């Protein structure tokens, strides 16, 4: 039996604010829907009036294009922070043997698989 969940892979985080330039994790922010790239491998999310770091470990890193922030979550590990917009979505572990799901702002291992694969918007976990 194959289990499926939403993919988190190259997550489109949302609109970014130019006022976030120079911001870092822990700094105050005002727009709870704001995102920004802090570096090539880190996005920032404004959550609870404070900038929060989100790792973008995948090869595409963090990119701001067309008014959107895209964070490549591939390569993420259990315990990494994830965005509010990613809640309930998942991705394969780097070794392809499990599924990580965003729960309450943190990636949690939810399944162990013989093989985990991602295809567009779905994660497949087979025994």
Image (cartoon, rainbow, N blue to C red):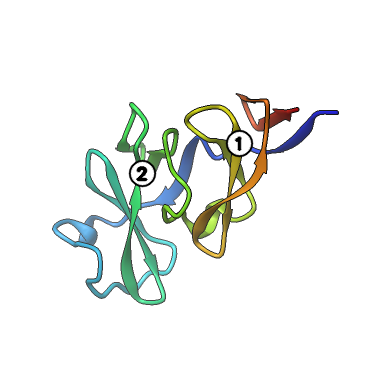
Relative to 47, is 82 above or below? above
Residue 85 drawn at (x, y percent): 54, 54
Q: Residues within 10 Å of mark 2 (few under 14, many from 20)?
A: few
Q: Which quadrant of the view contains residue 46?
A: bottom left
Find disc 1 in the rendering and name its residue: 98
Give the Cα separation between the discs numbered 2 and 1.
33 Å
Identify which residue, 63 or 40, lies in the foreground.
Answer: 40
Find disc 2 in the rendering and name its residue: 67
Residue 102 drawn at (x, y percent): 56, 53
Whether residue 24 sits left or right of residue 32 in the image: it is left
Q: Nearer the viewer, mark 2 or mark 1?
A: 1
Residue 89 drawn at (x, y percent): 62, 47
The residue depicted at 47 percent of the width and 56 percent of the height is: 83
Residue 117 drawn at (x, y percent): 62, 24
The residue depicted at 22 percent of the width and 71 percent of the height is: 27
Relative to 122, is 87 above or below? below
Residue contact at pointers 2 and 1, CB within 8 angstroms: no
């Amino acid at each position: 039996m194959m289990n499926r969940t939403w993919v988190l892979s190259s997550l489109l985080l949302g609109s970014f604010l130019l006022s976030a330039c120079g911001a870092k994790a822990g700094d105050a922010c005002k727009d709870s829907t704001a995102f920004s790239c802090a570096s090539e491998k880190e996005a920032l999310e404004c959550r609870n009036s404070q900038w929060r770091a989100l790792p973008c470990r995948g090869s595409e890193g963090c990119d701001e294009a067309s008014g959107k922030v895209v964070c490549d979550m591939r390569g993420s590990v259990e315990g990494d922070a994830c965005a509010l917009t990613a809640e309930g979505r998942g991705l394969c572990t780097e070794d392809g043997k499990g599924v990580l799901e965003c729960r309450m702002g943190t990636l949690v291992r939810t399944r162990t698989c013989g093989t985990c694969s991602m295809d567009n918007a779905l994660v497949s976990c087979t025994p």
